[in-house]
Image (cartoon, helix red, strand yellow):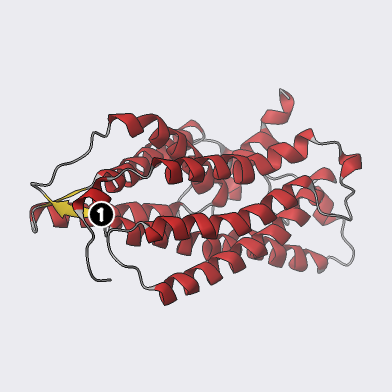
Amino acid sequence: MTGRRSNQSVQQFHWHLWLLFAIENWILDFGRPIAMLIFPLEWFPLNLPSVGDYFHMIYNIVTPFILQSLILKSPRKFNQSLFTVLMTVFVMGASIHLVGDSINHRLVLNGYQLHLSVRENPIMQKLDPPSLIDSFELLYFYDEELGHYMWYLPYFLCFLLFFNSTFVPAQSKTADAKAFWPLALLNSTYYWYLVTEGQITPLFIVTTCLMTILWLYQRIINGNSLDINGRFLLYTFHMTIILVAVWTSFFWNDEILRAKYASSLIYVPEPWSVYSLYGKRFF
């Protein structure tokens, strides 16, 4: 990446793109399972795509274009071939997740309990032959592990590369950051959901740490500071880490949830597992 644009371009807050990210994430990603609970099952038979599947399809198409719009506003030129590879992996991962999540939703409607592992679920223990459980564990791997990391690794790498281009000389004029706090809170709340439900805490922590290290290096060694878009990203990601930590503290001593996530690198329960375990008592 070479060549920095004018300071006027660097200092412009891309509020319309950050707002667009928030709207599409809240509606097309967070809203998917909620829409499936609201719409009558008769409208979307189990042998056809659900309303959530259509939300997911739209998300897979729209998100690369929003990311491209953000990259085009990067203060430094971005390697287009690298971006093409990242978006190819992104769409592959999100599409793998689409299929796995669609089948998982149908399993839930048939009694699958999200707070239990695949083998511990009563409906799985009734399968004949028992070796069919291996197929559902493979589905779980594609949905919750491979699909998620192929989806989110290029997603956050785009943010990281954009963030690396937002440093300006310390003497440069910086725009007032007060106006973006509500938008930062809106985005960080969604990223809390993404990190916890997607089980990508290690990836998100590494991304946030790399952003922080880059910021400290540029500030201490090179005497540079972040423009308003860089600050927005850094504050949003730090707020997300705090939200994830608070969420985890609520269920730190929950033996049932810990049993499911015992093999995870970092213990962070999924919101829909919590709902499966406790929420149905109240809704």
Q: Is residue 234 left or right of residue 43?
A: left
Q: Residue at x 40, y 29 (%)?
A: 182
Residue 256 seen by the camera: no
Depth check, front residue: 109 or 97? 97
Q: Is residue 244 left or right of residue 10?
A: right
Secondary-structure class at tag 1: loop
Depth check, front residue: 100 or 41? 41
> Could you say where residue 219 lies in the image, as x and y percent from the top left?
12, 52
Q: Residue at x 77, y 33 (%)?
A: 38
Label 1 neighbour load within 10 Å: few <14, some 14-19, many 20+: many
Residue labelled with disc 1: 166
> Could you say where residue 15 lies in the image, as x and y percent from the top left?
39, 40
For the N terminus, give its image quadrant: bottom left
Report the residue that reaches farthest toward the top: 282
Res. 277 image quadrant: top right
Q: Is residue 277 left or right of residue 255?
A: right
> Could you say where residue 104 lies in the image, as x and y percent from the top left?
75, 53
Res. 4 image quadrant: bottom left
> Could you say where residue 190 lies in the image, as x and y percent from the top left?
50, 40
Q: Residue at x 29, y 45 (%)?
A: 12
Depth check, front residue: 155 or 172? 172
**Please, is residue 109 above or below residue 76 in the view?**
above
**Please, is residue 138 above or below residue 56 in the view?**
below
Q: Is residue 277 left or right of residue 77?
A: right
Of the residues shown, which amino acid type is indicated by label 1? Answer: Thr
Res. 242 image quadrant: top left
Q: How many marks?
A: 1
Depth check, front residue: 211 or 206? 211
For the C terminus, give its image quadrant: top right
Residue 79 seen by the camera: yes
